[in-house]
Image (spheres, rainbow, N blue to C red):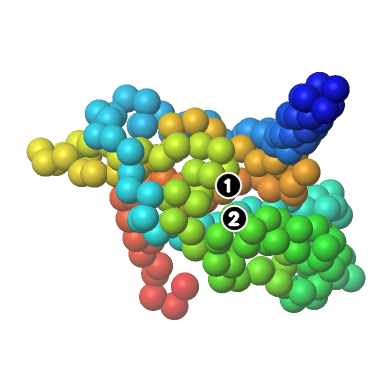
Amino acid sequence: MKSMSLSAVVVILGLGSLLMGQKKQVEWIPLDQPVPKSAVTAALIGPKSGADLLHLSISLPLRDPVGMQQFVDSVSDPTSPNYRHFATPEEIGARFGLPASAVKKVADYLTSQGFKVTLLAKSRQSIAADATVAQAQSAFNTTISEFSIVEPGKTEPDVRFAYNKPPSLPASIRPLVTYIGGLENIVQPRHGPIRHTIHPVGG
């Protein structure tokens, strides 16, 4: 009987641990941030070192984007009483940004993943943070690799990095983030030709 009771306890404890593990499973929801096209066509070198440091910028949505647009329009409208009455970043955040508690929730998540939060924008529209590649991969449920890419006009390839699948966030904070910058450098800005306008003397 004692042996049977002990076996039953072991089974119950095992089931309990299994259920707890199921409850702890994270529901990941991807951001609308597809893998860069350059990363799809470039030559894969291999995983980026997990110890490499990334400087990240996490973009947050506006709580009232319609109100923000109306305010911007009114500030630029000479017929509006708000014309040229600009707002401070703090005022923008309080009026149109996420609640401070929501911004803190995102920052707390980053900190819990080992990130060093370096800036909370006063406008409540972004958070800057530093993290290793390994920390970023874990926090955003993605993988980051290095690629060999030859830029137009060059003969020697450059080593760049990018994520291999769209970054994701836990369902609890996914609605609070719109974009994560700094997870790749494979997309380089293109500079167009500089055009100079010549103004007549006295004009």
Residue 178 location in percent, x, y?
66, 45
Camera-side residue of 37 and 28? 28
Residue 67 location in percent, x, y?
86, 54
In the rendered image, is residue 68 in sight?
no
Residue under label 2, please give it. Answer: 113
Q: Could you classify mark 1 by the number of other residues whose Cα lies within 10 Å: few (under 14), some (14-19), or many (20 or more)?
A: many
Q: Earlier in the sequence, mark 1 or mark 2?
A: 2
The alpha-carbon separation of the residues under discs 1 and 2 comes to 6 Å
**How many numbered marks does the figure carry?**
2
User: In the image, 111: left or right of 21?
Assistant: left
User: In the image, 57: left or right of 176?
Assistant: left
Q: Secondary structure at mark 2?
A: loop
Camera-side residue of 138 and 120? 138
Q: Residue at x 34, y 60 (%)?
A: 196
Residue under label 1, please give it. Answer: 139
Check disc 2 and give the amino acid type: Gln
Query: Looking at the image, do the residues carrying marks 1 and 2 touch, with CB atoms under 8 Å apart?
Result: yes
Camera-side residue of 129 and 74? 129
Q: Which mark is residue 95?
A: none
